[in-house]
Image (spheres, coloured by chain):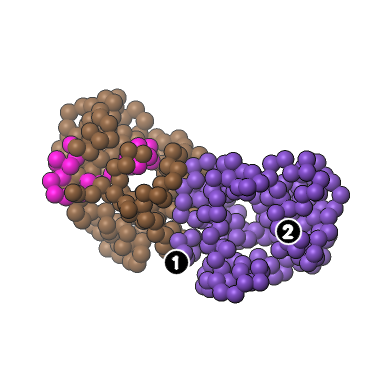
Chain colours: A brown, B purple
């Protein structure tokens, strides 16, 4: 069976996947860009934007696993837009006319709307469903390919709690946010379900790989 | 001036320095021995107990920094004994007749008692004082040597908040405890005061070094 994979999800040392005070101007709240500097600096990320250069090495190796073999993504409402995006009929996500998904994307929201097809193969579908229900839809759309779980922290927690995650890559960034949305809450004994590997990068980030046992 | 140093303080991925339910039988609560397996397996730790063997490499290199250059230790009441040890006039700590401190040790407690001198140069002093007050006493006892802050998490939080820590070594163990005593609470923006280095070990632990800027 195809896998459910999480890639490049960054958290602070104290386990926050985003800061407090998310808005259209500050998608990650008071965390700013600090959780993702390691990622946007990679050759993989820069190449997605048509740019040359960027770091190679362990950060880039992890970053590049984002795309191959993925047939659909699932994301939470708080990843798709700032608080209140449901009131903006024209909101089509943060990513402009050609989003970096190139697949169907299932956005979990209690206020579904019609699907939106953008350039590059990305179509956003809006569903009000449980984790296992939306996963059924995503698997059907992905065919033989894997499903990427895009976050945020709340959705990842729910999928972990439901036992629906096969692989999770986290990047622990050496900052202490103090407030925001926590990843670890409710995940006691997660290590019993996953083999965990840690590898630190010269960038300061530590990559954690969780592979389901 | 001499430094205030923290060594070999283990936390879970979710930032707990000890588990829930600490008692005489379970000093680290439901965490059991899992936070400290990397440490007790080192050549340094085994040699302290008169045993041969043990791991060498990065875990051992960090472990062995515990002792050199230290002239006194400060610890919290919850490190010295299980809840209620203050009611046991005969309690002299977990460590038997020859504790691994070999220096004056200042135990913070709201119920001081007379000092206790044990073998190997360890004397426990019991003081009801603020972090800066007890540090003054420990510095006086340590002379030109450094002061080790022994934990637990609550005392480390208080010293960090007071800006009294010069160096902190944490070992992040790949388990999710879910409950216990948190290290990170109240430490927002700690990275502004410290250079942080992360290095992962083949044992699965990630060593974090915080060096005051």
For residue A22, above or below residue B183? above
Seen at 58% across and 45% down, the residue is B29
Of residues B104 and A73, the one nearer the viewer is: B104
Q: Is residue B157 left or right of residue A28?
A: right
Q: Residue A136: x percent and y percent?
A: 19, 37
Seen at 33% across and 66% down, the residue is A56
Q: Chain of mark 1?
A: B
User: Callout 1: 10 Å neighbours few (<14), some, many (20+)?
Assistant: few
Query: Which disc, if any, is residue B96?
Result: 2
Q: Is residue B20 visible?
A: yes
Task: Please give the range of residues in magenta.
Answer: A137-160
Seen at 66% across and 69% down, the residue is B48
Of residues A42 and B154, the one nearer the viewer is: B154
Contact check, label 1 and label 2, Cβ < 8 Å: no
Q: Secondary structure at mark 2?
A: loop
Q: Secondary structure at mark 1?
A: loop
Q: Residue B205: x percent and y percent?
A: 48, 60
Q: Which residue is mark 1?
A: B202
Tally of numbered tags:
2
Seen at 42% across and 42% down, the residue is A187
Query: Which disc, if any, is residue A139?
Result: none
């Amino acid at each position: 069976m195809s896998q459910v994979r999480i890639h490049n999800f960054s958290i602070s040392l104290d386990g926050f996947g985003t800061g407090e005070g998310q808005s259209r101007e500050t998608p990650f709240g008071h965390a700013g860009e600090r959780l993702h500097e390691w990622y946007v600096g990679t050759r993989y990320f820069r190449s997605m934007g048509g740019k040359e250069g960027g770091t190679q090495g362990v950060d880039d190796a992890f970053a590049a696993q984002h795309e191959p073999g993925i047939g659909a993504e699932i994301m939470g409402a708080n990843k798709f837009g700032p608080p209140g995006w449901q009131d903006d009929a024209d909101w089509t996500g943060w990513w402009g006319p050609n989003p970096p998904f190139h697949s169907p994307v299932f956005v979990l929201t209690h206020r579904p709307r019609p699907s939106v097809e953008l350039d590059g193969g990305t179509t956003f579908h809006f569903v009000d469903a449980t984790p296992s229900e939306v996963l059924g839809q995503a698997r059907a759309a992905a065919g033989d390919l894997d499903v990427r779980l895009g976050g945020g922290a709340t959705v990842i927690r729910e999928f972990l709690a439901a036992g629906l995650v096969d692989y999770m890559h986290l990047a622990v960034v050496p900052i202490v946010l103090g407030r925001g949305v926590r990843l670890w809450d409710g995940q006691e004994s997660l290590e019993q379900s996953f083999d965990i590997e840690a590898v630190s990068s010269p960038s300061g980030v530590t990559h954690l790989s969780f592979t389901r046992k």
